[in-house]
Amino acid sequence: MECQECHKRPATLHFTQVINGKKSEISVCDVCAKEKGYVTYPEEAYSLHNLLSGLFNFDTSKIENPALHKMKDLQCPQCKMTFSQFKQVGKFGCATCYETFSDKLDPILRRVHAGNTKHFGKIPKRTGNDIQMKRQLYQFKSQLQQLIEQEEFEEAAKVRDQIKELEANIRNKEAGDQA
Amino acid sequence: MTLEHFMDDAISPWMREEGPSSDIVMSSRIRLARNIASIPYPIIAEEEKLAEVRHFIEKEYANKSFNSYHNFEFIPIKELTAIEQRVLVEKHLISPNLAKHTNESAVIISENEQVSIMVNEEDHLRIQLYFPGLQLRHALEKAFEIDDWLEEKVNYAFDEKKGYLTTCPTNVGTGMRASVMMHLPALALTGQINRMMPAINQLGLVVRGIYGEGSEALGNIFQISNQITLGKSEQDIVGDLESVVKQLIDHERNARELIMKESTTALEDRIFRSYGVLAYSRIIESKEASSCISNVRLGIDLGIIKDTSRNILNELMILIQPGFLQHYANKTLTPGDRDVLRASLIRERLKLEN
Ligand SMILES: [Zn+2]
Ligand SMILES: [Zn+2]
């Protein structure tokens, strides 16, 4: 089996992740396991400074790689923070930094947050309506899948109607936003 | 100006109420980190940008009331003396970090001191709520209400996939730190707490002493909080924390019972000696004072010391801190002078009880 991160080396380590109550399996090579933060070392896990510097140390090998060389010069257009500054202080300069450095973030987040890279918590009440609907849609769809697998077609039909309704709402809202 | 009442009472009004499991859990806290989408974060922003944030919060929220939280007092940190800043830190109304970058930082505090919102700390906004005893779920509910109240007027830095975009990657996602302050004298006495820590850490929770430095937990007061903010909902994080806290409560109760049964006289001796030290000493360092206060509080919980209120632990732990002592004296004190004043304030406070 090939590594699901680099798709080059053979996978040697297998992880089960429980994210928002759903189990998923991932297989990676030992190089990616380290670099992408699938393995954490207990003595580092609770000292943030070590954690972040340890984390960035893994990256130094990558900077030698000419294809990734330009990563070093990434700069946030909003606050002007560069990726090397971010590495030094371990803090973001503004909301746009997250977008700017997005390609490099998941390994960091995975190590800091026990394998997690995606938010499952609160959504802003006033401005987060669209996201709320999309999340609901996602939940309905996985529910539908489950019901079909369990051959509970009557229930499935109900959920399918709910999906249709919600999708129509989202379309209407998007049309409204553009107008 | 009502600043005086934040300063003069060691104990916050909300601490006077008893919460669930108050014999072991002193308080529950929820902290939410939030930022404004269009403004660079405090670590990098220009002063005038931060001044904008500060003025906005003052204009929209100063002297307002929301639900059961009344008359939010707006306090710019630069208007406080160093001693006053320290008192607010000791009462946990602001973080030590807020007091560090003073120029544009501020705090708004509800009259009952249950809610404080720090402005221009590491993040633009840090909402903090305290409840007596173990009330994490209730605290979370109330924290969300305050959060929505702020969001009515502020566009938060939020991303569908990454959640609330905080300054530090350790807070991203929910931006939430839930914590519980616990008095665990029996687990500390029997050394059990140190053995339990690795297991608690493995669950993504952190245990640390809240007073004192390093691994030392003055007054046997420990804070348990979540380490992970991404990938789990706030309710799940709080649920996990709560279940560990409940186990700790059970262990602490069992350990207390066991010590009571097996070494009643030795325990009574320890508790009454501590009471004697607090009631009669003329010079006392904070380390000795903390340990005696913890023993006396244990004596109250076990019914060995009667007619003394439980609040004494919360109150004296704050009263004996350097900032509070110096505020009381209304001048800067040397450590030696503080030890004398500390002993005298504790004696006075104990006299009030009888
Ligand atoms: Zn790989
Ligand atoms: Zn930026």
Image (cartoon, rainbow, N blue to C red):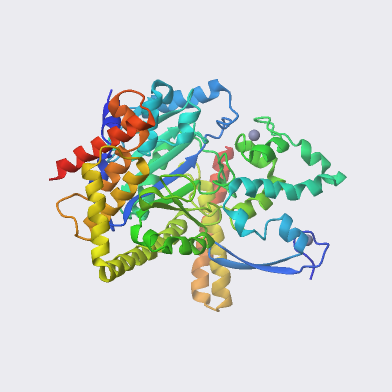
Quarter of the image with the C terminus of chain A is top right
Residue A117 visible from this viewpoint: no
In the image: residue B174, left or right of residue B327: right
Residue found at the very far left of the displayed protein:
B354
Q: Establish if B142 lies above or below B35.
A: below
For the residue pair A40 and B258, the one nearer the viewer reads as B258
Tally of marks: 0
Q: Quadrant of the N terminus of chain A?
A: bottom right
Q: Position of residue B4 (x, y in %)?
A: 27, 27
Q: Is residue A6 above or below residue B32?
A: below
- Between B165 and B282, the residue placed more toward the observer is B282
Image coordinates of residue B168 in percent, x first then y, are 58, 42
Q: In this orientation, does residue B187 appear? A: yes
Q: State which image quarter holds ligand 2.
A: top right
- The quadrant holding residue B332 is top left
State the image coordinates of residue A74 (x, y, percent, origin top left).
Answer: 75, 37
x and y, in percent, of residue A35 in the image? 73, 55
Residue lying at the far right in this picture: please name it. Answer: A66
Is B139 situated above or below B188? above
Q: Say which residue appears at 29% left-offset and 40% top-offset.
A: B67
Residue occupying image coordinates x 79% and y 59% = A6
Q: Using the image as rendered, state which of residue B201 and residue A11 is in the foreground.
A: B201
Is residue A13 left or right of B286 when viewed as pictured? right
